[in-house]
Image (cartoon, rainbow, N blue to C red):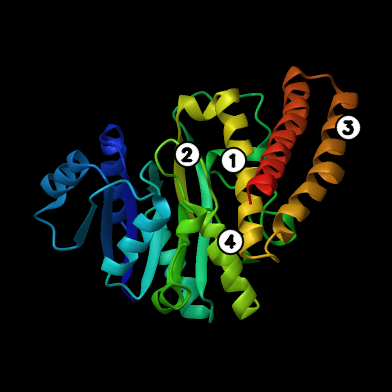
Amino acid sequence: MRVSVVICLHTIDRFDDFVEAADSVFAQTHDDVELVTVSDGSDAVCDAIREQFGDRDDVVTVCNEENQGLAVSRNRGSEAATGDIIAFMDDDAIADERWVEELVSVYDARDVPAVGGRMTARWVADKPRFLPAEFYWLIGVTPPRFGPENDASRGGEVRNTYGGNMSFRRDVLEEFGGFSPEMGGRKGDKNIQGEETELCARMEQEYGHGMYYNPDARVAHKIFDYRTDPLWLLDRAFWQGYSIRGMETLVPASSGTESDFLADLLFESVPDRLKSLLAGPSLAVVLQLCLLFVLTGAVGVGYLYGALRY
């Protein structure tokens, strides 16, 4: 089974990390892997990719003439790919050597349209004491309470995994027309998110089931300093709320996962931290408890802003 891995890059500043991501694809234990690289509107990136990988016959390069955003770039990469399975990684991530093998093992064993895996953290910056694990999804990392029975170590059906570690059967992507440009993806300085969630919501609505989550299919996401900045986290939480409202406009029945997350936050996470404080005061627990409410509020404000805009 041939697997095409699509990685998109917009700025030359990330090229060294992009090369490390590509090298992790070349190191896969699965024996039929193709890398599809997409330069999103940067001549410098396009030239650098061709110089770095031009002599490899397992690399396909696509160059957008202008910045189109992640959704369009992923679609263009998918169209250029030749694999039976199309997988997606971020340009600042590193795949475990068994990542593709683990994805393929699910396709071989199950009749599923899509398979995703677990995003782990590679802390380039110091791990912040104030960031609650429930909000690790803001930094592109799978939180502990994820998936079947709110346990990220368990495999099973979910609506979707995170965009830096997901894959689809080729015919499924073609049937649904790929990622919706209406959700934007990350384009320029905008932090709009949700193109992969919206696609998987449509898929779940059509097929009656979503993506299969395999926690053993691991990709590490580099966490740089800027991703631990409280202001950056607030901005990202705001745009996440905005994106959720946009996704509901396109797929009205898509918000169940977010509702479950909010209920778990209020009735599980908050009480657990209050118990921890009663058992033994801790500055880290106090900070995380406060940020739980602040980040939830930022998501809510973004959602309301999205309701006004949409």
Q: Position of residue 132 (x, y in %)?
A: 68, 33
Circle 3: residue type: Lys
Q: CA distance from mark 1 to mark 4?
A: 19 Å
Residue 36 appears left or right of 121: left
Q: CA distance from mark 3 to mark 2?
A: 39 Å
Mark 4 Cα shell of 10 Å, populated few (<14), some (14-19), many (≥20)? many
Q: CA distance from mark 2 to mark 4?
A: 22 Å
| Residue nearer the viewer, 195 or 109 | 195
Looking at the rendered structure, the secondary structure element under dot 2 is: loop
Q: CA distance from mark 4 to mark 3?
A: 32 Å
- Which quarter of the image is occupied by the N terminus? bottom left
One can see residue 48 in this view: yes
- Give yes or no for contact between labels 3 and 1 (Cβ–Cβ under 8 Å): no
Q: Residue furthest left?
A: 55
- Exactly how many numbered labels are in the figure? 4
Q: Residue at position x 87%, y 30% from top?
A: 274
Q: Position of residue 215 (x, y in %)?
A: 56, 58
Q: Which residue is mark 4?
A: 160
One can see residue 143 in this view: no
Mark 2 Cα shell of 10 Å, populated few (<14), some (14-19), many (≥20)? few
Circle 4: residue type: Asn
Q: Position of residue 306 (x, y in %)?
A: 65, 46
- What is the number of the mark on residue 239? 1
Q: Upstream in the sequence, badge 1 or badge 4? A: 4
Q: Residue at position x 18%, y 42% from top?
A: 43
- What is the number of the mark on residue 190? 2
Q: Which residue is mark 3?
A: 275
- Give yes or no for contact between labels 3 and 2 (Cβ–Cβ under 8 Å): no
Looking at the rendered structure, the secondary structure element under dot 3 is: helix
Looking at the rendered structure, the secondary structure element under dot 4 is: loop
Q: Upstream in the sequence, badge 4 or badge 3? A: 4
Circle 2: residue type: Lys
